[in-house]
Image: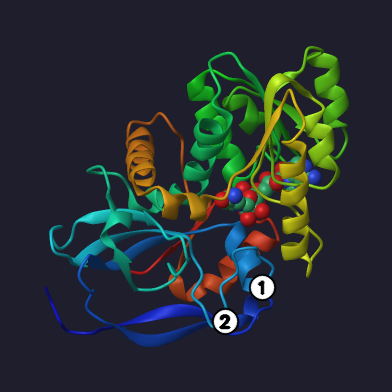
Amino acid sequence: MNDEALSGREIIVESFGGVEVLRLRERTFSAPPPGHARVRTVAIGVGFTDLMARRGDYLLQRKVPFTPGYELVGEVVDHEELEPGTLVAAALPKMGAYADYVVLPSWLLVPLPDGLDPAVAATVPLDYLTALSILETHAQLTTGDTVLIHGASGGVGQALSQLGRLKGLRMYGTASAAGSDERLARYGVSFIDYRHQDFAAVIAQREPDGISAVFDHIGGANIRKGYRLLARGGVFVSYAFAGRPGHMVADTVRGALRVNLLNLLPGRRTAVCMLPKEIKSNHDWYRHSLRRLLEQVHAGELEVAPGATFPLAQAADVHRALERREINGKAVLTTK
Ligand SMILES: NC(=O)c1ccc[n+]([C@@H]2O[C@H](COP(=O)([O-])OP(=O)(O)OC[C@H]3O[C@@H](n4cnc5c(N)ncnc54)[C@H](OP(=O)(O)O)[C@@H]3O)[C@@H](O)[C@H]2O)c1
């Protein structure tokens, strides 16, 4: 083990706000305490949740100053067991990935399959673990079940679509972005343009007996509309609530309460998926699932590609581009 502190950069959110609040600063990263590893980051995934946290409008909000970033791939620098240079992936339950180095508990580190591109792997942990939890922990579906995926063009939505295809689900997906119809068709998802079609009317007409599951990240009126589409025994899973800007936390709490109240009614189930909490409460599930997902990506069973790659110092440009929806898919920050 190397006891030396190492110098590097990190991005911090100094105060909540627009992209201008992201600041690059130099700092030192101490040697890891027992049971931890120091990791030199190589590729860092950037998603919509980072933007919410930067604005201070996120349920699991960190206090300022904080370093955003839920996921990364890096090289082990020093650890009790792993060889220096070993490539690992991790989802960070408390964020902190936008940096040259991170110090993480050992259980978070999952070695990369040999030859898997770090920039590709860095886009996997948050979206694919969330999708896997929705499908397997919360929904427990079987081949041939019919589901509705809201925002099937988004990060988590594409992960749900691809994992759903591997499970043999029949899938409908709402989206609006240009090219969504073709992208969704590639995953076997029937496209519903939510700007021009009423998703509930489309499903009610095509699936008069009801469907097995609805996966929702919008909340509000979508909750009751989606719940009503379920067949007996069906499940409604929420994984986010698109609240009013500045009121996102209160709106999320209110939405989660409504979803939980619906679960008191007989005949159908509801659930709320919150990945950071699930990672902390079930280390074995996290490690096993992330390893399995990375292997599926490596084997080409899941098509994953970053929509754009930028150097760490340009984190603000990435946030701006994601906000303007100029990047299709997830972005990646690189440190070398
Ligand atoms: N529960 C968890 O642990 C967890 C984990 C990860 C993410 N999240 C949350 O999940 C949400 C989505 O994250 P993401 O990274 O997938 O975001 P994203 O990549 O920006 O995708 C969101 C998608 O939602 C679609 N959308 C927007 N308005 C819609 C509407 N009214 N109806 C249906 N679809 C609509 C957009 O589709 P078009 O662009 O095609 O219009 C977009 O593709 C965020 O709130 C995020 O914080 C939660």
Q: Split into 4 quadrants, where in the image is the C terminus?
A: bottom left
**Of callouts 2 and 1, the N-terminal one:** 1
Residue 192, position as x, y percentages in the image: 77, 30
**313 on left or right of 241:** left
Decide if ligand 1 comes within 8 Å of the CB at mark 2. Answer: no
Q: Is 263 situated above or below 319?
A: above
**109 on left or right of 151:** left
Q: Which mark is residue 126?
A: none
Q: Residue at x 44, y 71 (%)?
A: 312
Q: Residue at x 26, y 59 (%)?
A: 106
Q: Which mark is residue 56?
A: 1
- How far apart, in angstroms, are the residues tagged by discs 2 and 1? 9 Å
Q: Residue at x 63, y 84 (%)?
A: 15
Report which quarter residue 232 is drawn in.
Answer: top right
Q: Nearer the viewer, residue 113 or 126?
A: 126
Q: Nearer the viewer, residue 55 or 269?
A: 269
- Label 2 close to label 1 by CB (< 8 Å): yes
Q: Is 212 situated above or below 315?
A: above
Residue 283, position as x, y percentages in the image: 36, 49
Residue 138, position as x, y percentages in the image: 56, 35
**248 on left or right of 300:** right
Residue hosting label 2? 64
Of the residues shown, which amino acid type is indicated by label 2?
Answer: Val
Of the residues shown, which amino acid type is indicated by label 1?
Answer: Gly
